[in-house]
Amino acid sequence: TFRHYIQLSDNVFPESWRDNKTKVSPEERKVFSDQCELYMAQSSIPNAGIGVYTAVDYKNGDHIGEGEMLIPVLTTVENWLVDDVEWGLDLDERLYYEDEKVSGSIFYPGFGAQINCHFGLNNAEHNKPKFDAVGLHRSKDPGVGAFTNWHDMPNIATRDIRSGEELFVDYGYGWFTSRVHLMGDIPTDDEFSHADRIVQKMHALSSKNITTIPKKTFKNKKDLALEDFWGFLRKLSNQALERALPQRYGDLEEVVKHGSARHSVGGESSIRSHEWLNKNGICVDHLYVNVSTIPQAGRGAFAKRFIPKDSVVSPAPVLQLNRGHFYHQSKGFELLFNYAYGHPDSPIFLLPYSSTVNFINHDSRHPNVKLRWSTSPLHRKDFLDLSSEEVLKQGFGLMMEFISLRDIHPHEEILFDYGAEWERAWQKHVADWSPVPGAETYMTADEVIKIIGILTIEEQKAKSYPDNVRTACFFGNAEDTFYKNITKEGDLFKSFQVDQWKSNNDECLRWCTILERRSRNGNDAFYDVLIEPQTAHLLEECVLPSDEEIYVNNVPSNRVTLVDVEHSRDQNLPNAFRHFIRLPDDLYPGAWRQNRTK
């Protein structure tokens, strides 16, 4: 028989009687340490800005921190700060099929934006993200397309990491070569290895006693000579190697002990103590990600541990960007716009790039955090007095903080008031919303794989794929791939056959047609495929001649998949919600405001 209480409305029920707001079921709740595990502080790399340090030990292969979101970037504008924190589409091959107008970059906040790169000390890497809409569907949910479906981008330790170490991730050499005019030549892992060998030989030479002259007299003269020789040797090196070598001859012994890479960031003193982190850093580990308690919001940020009133819930370093750069003539405002904070009377919009803060959702009735400008010395408060034109010319330095309005308990969702303008826009969107044609039958490529599977071209005659899905295979033009010419007289295309797919072809995800499925001894399936001509959505080294047909046999099942065609994913829906988050007047600098212009 039916049983349910009668719920009183929020404006009737006393605030003081309410429990902490949480809908994370007990079985879904993770257990977190009371100790902060990750801190944001000044990087140990000179002039590198902020960095992230661990306050606990990690073993090789351990997950570090929270999985983060990814947001495809459509904007291709010179000299905007997103360029310095964005990543390439090779974070996940499926990103190449997001949109043919994607600029080749992904906004990856948190670990992707805050962690620096040091080729001699890199200790973390990214893995593959997840892609889903948290159970929401474009046929019934107006929130679909308003948040990114790319989430839970994991961060993995690539070696044992000591408590107090700064975290470093490999940016790739291309990031530095494109900025050599600004940064000069940066030492790679090869230069640091070369520097270690030079230092070891030089130290061995300085340790030898090769004279009968009294030790004290000889040592002074030898040290002076070796110091001069060391300076001469450094000048003979290329710029990258010179920067990897210690400047002072007297530091050789320490470099032999700890290595040139560790010496370049200050030696053992770069391993920060808990006392140093608490004094000089800000915890970036108070939050975790789960399904939001707010309808249609997707995912949300939740408290890992108890956070007292008036505490910093999370720092929020921000990029200052021009509002107009979020807009595209053909698509309107892109998804990145939904994560930006701004004011209607200013062209300056602020994009947070700290871990998990972009998962914080809206609640105007019961927010438990507010924003303020950071009190940390890492914040460039002088930027607040600059004009809007001048502040857009500056680099990194602006930082805000989410502050708890009351005591926040473990597993409680973190909620912020986005402003009345945002709320009115959302309410209008919900009232006016209707699904796009064909929404009822829509499935993502991942869903089609689970429900239908991989079909041959013959099988698709009986059960076709949705229009938004295509078959794709991993195949690249490897040097040792043998191509058998099977072109027949009169063929419009040159035809080649590859009898055996090889693991070194595992680079390029491209369109293909499944001709036949076969199995070996009843085990995993293998496929014979036709590689289709393609130039879009591929790295340059993956492009094959357009007048050639390539048949590849024995492609393993885990190298065949389905991809969503361009424009088909939720963020490209024409009825997706778009609106910035409004900062209150008393928080937004007066110097940045202008008369509103259309």
Image (cartoon, rainbow, N blue to C red):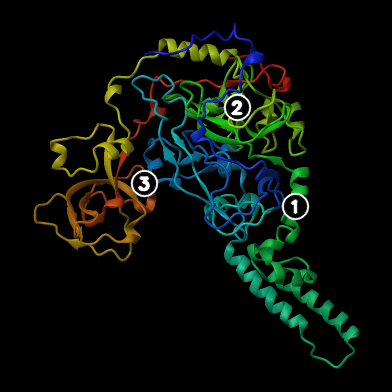
Residue at image coords 31%, 47%: 510
Q: Is residue 128 left or right of residue 383?
A: left
Locate the N terminus and report the quarter of the image it occupies.
top left
Q: Are marks 2 and 3 in contact (CB under 8 Å)?
A: no
| Residue 458, x across and y down, in percent | 13, 42
Q: Nearer the viewer, residue 35 or 481?
A: 35
- Determine which residue is flagged by label 1: 273
Circle 3 SS class: loop
Secondary structure beneath label 1: loop
Residue type at numbered disc 1 = Ser
**Of the numbered discs in the image, which one, if any, rests on residue 414?**
2
Q: Secondary structure at mark 2?
A: loop
Above or below 268: residue 348: above
User: Of the numbered discs in the image, which one, if any, rests on residue 538?
Assistant: 3
**Where residue 102 sits in the image (x, y, percent)?**
43, 36
Residue depicted at x 29% and y 19%: 437
Give the distance between the C-alpha atoms of the residues marked 2 and 3, in whole angstroms.
40 Å
